[in-house]
Amino acid sequence: MTEVPSTTDHSCLLTPDQTADRLGISRSTLRRMRLRGDRPKPVIITARTIRYEAAEVDLWLEGRSASKAAGQALRHG
């Protein structure tokens, strides 16, 4: 498993493997999300080097969790 930097270190760039691990998805799913234009937004360094800002990934993940919780509350409310 790839080492994932701390969620408190928002200044670092994550590799696709680290990003996929942090999100709990496969690298191929992350690639499909990028090609569809979904978040988290990638940082394109070169044609073959893609990174993701840790802060962007964490914010996206928090937003997804909040949306999921709100949806569940509406269904069970």
Image: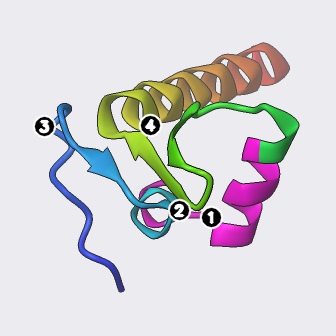
Q: Position of residue 36 (x, y in %)?
A: 86, 38
Residue 26 visible somewhere in the drawing = no
Q: Which residue is mark 1?
A: 25
Which residue is painted at 13% across and 39% down in the image?
9
- The reply to whether callout 1 and callout 4 are in contact (CB within 8 Å) is no
Amino acid marked by disc 2: Ala
Q: Is residue 66 magenta?
A: no
Question: Dot 1 lies on which element?
Answer: loop
Q: Earlier in the sequence, mark 2 or mark 4?
A: 2
What main secondary structure does the magenta stretch of the protein show? Answer: helix
Q: Is residue 27 magenta?
A: yes
Q: Is residue 71 left or right of residue 10?
A: right
Q: Is residue 32 above or below residue 35?
A: below
- Crowding around mark 1 (Cα neighbors within 10 Å: few <14, some 14 to 19, many 20+) is few
Residue type, mark 3 in image: Thr
Coordinates of residue 41 in the picture (x, y in percent) = 58, 31
**Counting residues from the N terminus, which is met first, the one under dot 2 or under dot 1?**
2
Sequence-earlier tag: 3 or 1: 3
Report the residue at 73% width, 58% height from top.
31
Mark 2 or 3 closer to N-term? 3
Distance CA(mark 2)–CA(mark 1): 5 Å
Report which residue position mark 4 lands on: 57
What is the CA distance from the residue labelled 1 to the residue labelled 4? 13 Å
Report which quarter residue 15 is drawn in. bottom left
Reading the chain from its start, which is encountered first: label 3 or label 4?
3
In the rendered view, tell whether residue 49 sits above or below residue 67. Answer: below
Precedes in sequence: disc 1 or disc 4: 1
Residue type pointed to by label 1? Ile
